[in-house]
Amino acid sequence: MASPHSAELPSDVALLRDFVNTLDVEKMLDDVPTPEALAGWFRSQELLSPADTVSPEAFTAAIQAREALRAVLLSHNGEPLAPAELRTLERVAAASPLTVGFGSSGVTLRPAAQGGWKALGSLFAAMATAQRDGRWERLKLCPAGDCQSAFYDTSKNRSGRWCSMRICGNRMKTQRFRTGAARQAR
């Protein structure tokens, strides 16, 4: 059986997933620990030109937005969401203005800022597109505390819970079984 996120992802969803996954919780490794590293990541995603930079303020806002986005994606998996996370996203989005563009593919949102704020605007435009196209709720965060990877749920009924049923899902089921067996043994 295919994993709930094995299909080819739309570019907006892949961008958001990859941004959230710049923090590897299991290995405690942050791919973007500095403004320069974040600028490099944004360039690799074609969100910044080689001459663009990420200011310290935009860097701080990006990390805050990433962590708030992680909480939102976890809420897509049934966990409660603190209103503070939404306020953080609103605050960062306000500093990352968007404009409406028109082209052969229709109406799009485009970033209207410069540097790191422009790249952040692209992330918010991707969120709006995913919401509009009905894919936003399928972007989730694995609830396994030692994983917390973002993934796209491609299950028909949108019930995918784990980034990998074979790894995280199996670990959690085994843990629940052991906890239940220990309770019964008492």
Image (tube, grey):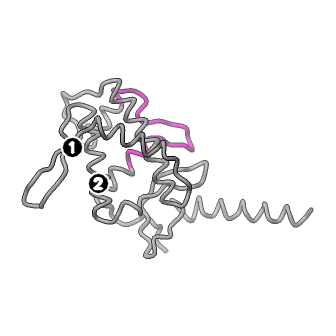
Q: Residue furthest right?
A: 186
Q: Residues within 10 Å of mark 2 (few under 14, many from 20)?
A: some
Residue visible at 85% across and 62% down in the picture: 183
Q: Magenta residues?
A: 18-37
Q: Position of residue 148 (x, y in %)?
A: 53, 50
Labelled pair 1, 2 in contact (Cβ < 8 Å): yes
**Residue designated by label 2:** 128
**Residue designated by label 1:** 98
Q: Pick whichever, 112 or 160, lies toward us.
A: 112
Residue visible at 44% across and 57% down in the picture: 151
Query: Mark 1 falls on what kind of element?
Result: strand
Give the position of the C terminus as an image quadrant. Answer: bottom right
| Residue 183 placement, left or right of 143 | right
Residue 116: image tag: none
Of the residues shown, which amino acid type is indicated by label 2?
Answer: Ala
Query: Mark 2 falls on what kind of element?
Result: helix
